[in-house]
């Protein structure tokens, strides 16, 4: 399910790149797209191989309802073309993974888990720094907005966070 989600998550960044106002914004969106495509995909490919699966096999699997709801929400937000909204839809995934996997990495037995490679990627200090950079970018991007617009964006962030939680359950 995570591979299905990430394929669509990457598409959302493509939309954000298209609508970026500056070269710096393009670079920031591209950096996350690159992480999703390269680092995350590499670890997932290794796990898929353990289960004798490929990306082609994943393409044949339908998303579970929780996953589809999350994907649909992100595409609905991205269809507006406003990058502040897209940011609020994608940040909960990024930030929650950093938080959760840093907590997991602190548990000594996590190193023996078959998911350790996955855990250490998201618990990595560089990933945490990227999350800080993205959070600062979002703060900057939204700084001059009206109170009503900030409330609207906070609602998007909250809904995306709840969809992220449902995905984990």
Image (spheres, rainbow, N blue to C red):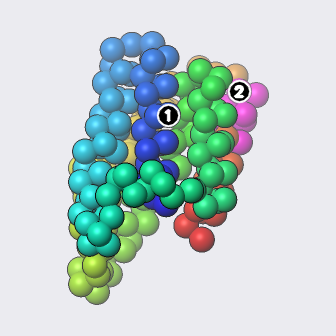
Given residues 39 and 53, the one toward you in this image is 53
First in residue order: circle 2 vs circle 1: 1
Of 59 and 64, nearer the camera is 59
Q: Quadrant of residue 164?
A: bottom right
Q: Position of residue 162 (x, y in %)?
A: 65, 57
Say the numbered circle drawn on residue 149.
2
Is 113 positioned to the left or the right of 60 in the image? left
Above/below status of 69 relative to 106? above
Percent coordinates x, y for residue 64 in the rendering = 61, 61
Q: Residue 153 in the image: state x and y as whole percent.
A: 66, 35
The image quadrant where one finds the C terminus is bottom right
The residue drawn where x is 38% and y is 71% is 103
- Indicate left or right for 96 with 132 as reference: right
Camera-nearest residue between 98 and 5: 5
Residue 32 painted magenta:
no
Per the image, label 1 sits on a secondary structure element best described as helix
| Residue drawn 66% across the image and 59% down it | 65
> Alpha-carbon distance for marks 2 and 1?
21 Å
Percent across and percent down for residue 118 are 30, 65
Q: Does residue 92 show up?
A: yes
Asked whether the viewer can see residue 40, the reply is no
As drawn, 56 above or below 109: above
Question: Residue at label 1?
Answer: 12
For residue 138, above or below residue 35: above
- Is 117 left, or right, of 86 in this rendering? left
Mark sitting on residue 138: none
Label 1 neighbour load within 10 Å: few <14, some 14-19, many 20+: many
What residue lies at 55% left-to-right and 67% top-to-bottom? Answer: 168
The residue stretch that appears in magenta: 147-155
Magenta-colored segment: predominant secondary structure: helix
Which of 169 and 100 lies nearest the eye of the viewer? 169
Identify the residue at image location x=64%, y=59%: 66
């Amino acid at each position: 399910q995570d591979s299905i989600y990430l394929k669509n998550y990457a598409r959302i960044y493509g939309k954000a790149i298209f609508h970026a106002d500056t070269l710096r914004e393009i670079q920031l969106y591209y950096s996350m797209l690159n992480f999703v495509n390269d680092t995350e995909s590499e670890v997932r490919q290794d796990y898929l191989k353990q289960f004798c699966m490929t990306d082609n096999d994943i393409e044949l699997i339908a998303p579970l309802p929780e996953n589809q709801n999350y994907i649909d929400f992100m595409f609905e937000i991205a269809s507006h073309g406003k990058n502040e909204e897209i940011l609020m839809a994608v940040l909960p995934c990024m930030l929650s993974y950093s938080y959760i996997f840093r907590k997991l990495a602190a548990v000594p037995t996590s190193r023996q888990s078959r998911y350790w490679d996955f855990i250490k990627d998201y618990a990595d200090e560089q990933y945490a720094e990227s999350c800080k950079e993205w959070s600062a970018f979002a703060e900057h991007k939204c700084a001059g907005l009206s109170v009503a617009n900030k409330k609207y964006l906070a609602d998007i962030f909250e809904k995306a966070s709840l969809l992220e939680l449902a995905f984990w359950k």
